[in-house]
Structures are given as C-alpha cells and as structure tokens.
Image (cartoon, rainbow, N blue to C red):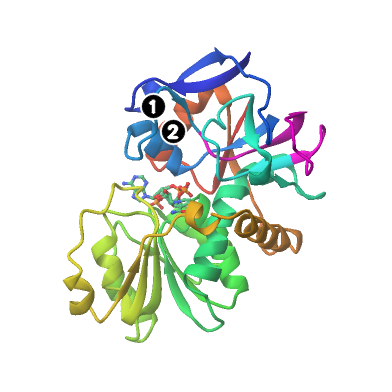
C-alpha cells in the first residue's frame, strides 16, 4: 500500500482525496519509483477539472523524482537504488510511489537534487522544446513570453536570455514582474493593466515580435496575435485562463500571414530518443548554472488540493513541489 491522491470524478480541488492504494510489483519493462519530490504543474489542474480527459478513477501528476526500489522483468537500463526522474507521466505522480516504464525515466545527474529534478523535468523540458525547436530563438531576437513569473515562465526567462534574446515577459503583479526581471526578462508588461500590443510596439520600435509563447490561453490569445510581426509564430501552449475557443483561420491572414501552433511536451518527447535528447539539453544548462530550478513553494503531498487552489488563484510563483 502507498498513499496517493486520487479522483473519482472531475471538478474543483475538493475532488482530490488522499488515500491508501495498492501498488502491484512492476510489470515487465517497468520499475517502481519511490518518490522523494513531486512536481506541481498547471496541467494537473486540467486533468482534475476534466478539461483534459482521463479514465476515472485515476491518480494525478506527471512529474516526480525518486529512487528505483523494484525492477520488472527485462529492464536492463536501471537498477535498484538509481536516482531517477520523469516529466511525461505516467499519470499518478501524486503518490509515495508508482510504477513507470523504464524507457520514460531519466537518471538524475550528480549535482542535481531530487527537488530540483522534480521541479524541472516537465517545465524545463517544455522550455527546451519551445525555445529550441518550436521556434529556434536566435541571438538578437525579441520574444514575448506570457506568465513570465510562473513555473515555466521563470525557466524560459533564464534560458531565452542565455540564447541571446531580448525577453519581453508579462506578469500579473509588480512583485511577479520583479521576479521575471531577476530571471532575465528585459521588459515586463503588467498585462492586467497595460495595453500589451501597444507596449510591444513601443519596445520593438514598431517591429513587433517574431514569436509569442502563450500558456495563458483564452484571455491572451487575441492580444498575442496583435503582438506578432508579419509571418510571426503564435505558440499557444496552455490554458491557464481557460481553453482558447475555436479559431477562424482567416484571422491569420488578416493579421499578417501568421503561423499558429499548439504544441505539447508529449509530442516533442514522443520517442525515447527525443526524450533523452530533451532531458540531456535541460541537465546541461542546469549543470552550467544557466537555468536554476528555484523551488519557491513546497506542500506536503496530503495538501495537494491546497496547492491546486493556490496555483489557480495565481498565488504561486516559479516552481512548486509536493513532498510525500
Ligand atoms: P504557472 O506557474 O505559470 O501558473 C499559471 C500562471 O498563469 C499564473 O501564475 C498566472 O500568472 C497566469 N495566469 C493568467 N491568467 C490566469 C488565470 N485566469 N488563472 C490562473 N492563472 C492565470 O503554471 P505552469 O508553469 O505549470 O504552466 C504554465 C502554462 O504552460 C500552463 O498553461 C500550462 O498548461 C502550460 N504548459 C504546457 C505544456 C505543453 O507542452 N503544452 C507543458 C507545460 C506547461 P500571472 O499572475 O503572472 O498572470
């Protein structure tokens, strides 16, 4: 038996219950990971609310770090005692332990703590593909990244700065703006008060930006399109304010022959090779000190519902971990 957060129906944070669940021995190709730290991500709230469907009842959470304590048949790449982390599931990371396919786990390098790995796997690999593959950020580019003081956002500010970009971030408060600036944002727009396209026009001398990274969704979609230069790329990668309603593609013509993509980490780490490359690139920038995890909130696993309330109320900044 292990303690785990489970849901039997979708809804608000109250649907989450902390209970004892049976954990079978790992199947062939799997190992059992005894979690030491679990990453909290906005996507967890989508599975809980039902925005993203999952077969019920189910666990929650896609990101954790820990130690291998049992190995299934046929696993040759990992052994008991290895420190490992994952950021692409399986669903059920909000638990003391779960079984996971060995080929989707990454060994945590020496020098990276379990907490930092749990905070970085999903968010940091997301930033890797966004900045290095969805749109390859070049030195001299000016980019717009929404929710720059959030979990993904603070990592993106650091990494984009390292790539030589001028970073325009958006944030919900002055305190958050300060955090984003410390992480490398050159300009921060308070998007609850200011006219974002007008500020982007002013900052770029009228040129606008070649790419907007938008994880806020419904509330920012239109304004993000208005911040793009002709033939710019709109990267809509999340729904913190709600899902973007269906889009009439004619708008991409009207606003300047724009491109639109709706990427996911799952798509960019679909093969084991993609996953290994993405994680290696992330651990490389962590080892060089270019990107730091900076875990800013910790909750006991049993208090995961409160962590969801705070995340959805925009009370958190940067990365958050749950401790089993
Ligand atoms: P964050 O820590 O960034 O939290 C979300 C932030 O969004 C809030 O702190 C808030 O910042 C901002 N926000 C704006 N409007 C709202 C609103 N109405 N309600 C709540 N928050 C709002 O979360 P994560 O770092 O975990 O994720 C950021 C985004 O990236 C999410 O949309 C997530 O789904 C997405 N994502 C997508 C992935 C992919 O591969 N497609 C992978 C990983 C994450 P502020 O107060 O400054 O506005």
Please state which of residues 241 and 83 is positioned toward the viewer in this rendering. 83
Please state which of residues 43 and 248 is positioned toward the viewer in this rendering. 248
Please state which of residues 172 and 6 is positioned toward the viewer in this rendering. 6
Residue at 33% from the left image edge and 27% from the top image edge: 10
Q: Disc 1 vs disc 2: Cβ atoms closer than 8 Å?
A: yes
Whether residue 152 is in magenta: the answer is no
Q: Which residue is mark 2?
A: 308
Quadrant of residue 4 within the rendered picture: top right
Label 2 CB, ligand 1: below 8 Å?
Answer: no
Inter-mark Cα distance, 1 to 2? 6 Å
Q: Quadrant of the N terminus?
A: top right
**Of the numbered discs in the image, which one, if any, rests on residue 13?**
1
In the rendered image of this protein, does residue 136 appear above or below residue 263? below
Within 10 Å of disc 1 (Cα), the crowding (few <14, some 14-19, many 20+) is some
**Of the numbered discs in the image, which one, if any, rests on residue 222?**
none
Report helix, strand or loop for mark 2.
helix
Q: Is residue 244 left or right of residue 183?
A: left
In the rendered image of this protein, does residue 234 appear above or below residue 318? below
User: Residue 91, percent across and down?
Assistant: 51, 34
User: Residue 229, percent across and down?
Assistant: 33, 81
Q: Quadrant of the C terminus?
A: top right
In the rendered image of this protein, does residue 294 appear above or below residue 82? below
Residue at 24% from the left image edge and 64% from the top image edge: 222
Q: Give whichever of discs 1 and 2 has the lower sequence position.
A: 1
User: Which residue range is magenta in the image?
Assistant: 61-83
Residue at 28% from the left image edge and 49% from the top image edge: 243
User: Residue 115, percent across and down?
Assistant: 68, 40
Report helix, strand or loop for mark 1.
helix
């Amino acid at each position: 038996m292990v303690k785990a957060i489970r849901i039997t129906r979708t809804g608000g944070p109250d649907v989450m219950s902390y209970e004892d669940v049976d954990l079978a021995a790992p199947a062939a190709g799997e190992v059992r990971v005894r979690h030491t730290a679990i990453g909290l991500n906005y996507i967890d709230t989508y599975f809980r609310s039902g925005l993203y469907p999952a077969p019920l009842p189910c666990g929650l959470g896609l990101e954790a770090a820990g130690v291998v304590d049992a190995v299934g048949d046929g696993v040759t790449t990992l052994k008991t005692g290895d420190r490992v982390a994952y950021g692409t599931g399986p669903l059920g990371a909000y638990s003391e332990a779960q079984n996971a396919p060995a080929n989707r786990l990454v060994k945590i390098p020496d020098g990276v703590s379990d907490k930092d790995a749990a905070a970085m796997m999903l968010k940091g690999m997301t930033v890797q593909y966004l900045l290095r593959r969805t749109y390859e950020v070049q030195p001299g580019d000016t980019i717009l990244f929404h929710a720059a003081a959030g979990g993904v956002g603070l990592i993106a500010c650091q990494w984009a700065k390292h790539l030589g970009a001028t970073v325009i971030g958006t944030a919900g408060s002055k305190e958050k703006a300060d955090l984003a600036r410390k992480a490398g944002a050159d300009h921060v727009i308070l998007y609850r008060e200011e006219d974002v396209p007008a500020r982007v026009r002013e900052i770029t001398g009228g040129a606008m930006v070649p790419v907007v990274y938008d994880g806020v969704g419904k509330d920012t979609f239109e304004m993000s399109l208005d911040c793009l230069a002709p033939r710019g790329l709109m990267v809509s990668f999340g729904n913190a304010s709600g899902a973007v309603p269906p889009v009439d593609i004619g708008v991409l013509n009207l606003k300047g022959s724009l491109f639109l993509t709706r990427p996911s980490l799952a798509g960019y780490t679909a093969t084991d090779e993609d996953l290994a490359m993405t994680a290696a690139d992330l651990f490389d920038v962590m080892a060089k000190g270019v990107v730091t995890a900076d875990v800013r909130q910790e909750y006991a696993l049993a208090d995961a519902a409160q962590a969801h309330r705070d995340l959805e109320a925009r009370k958190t900044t940067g990365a958050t971990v749950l401790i089993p």
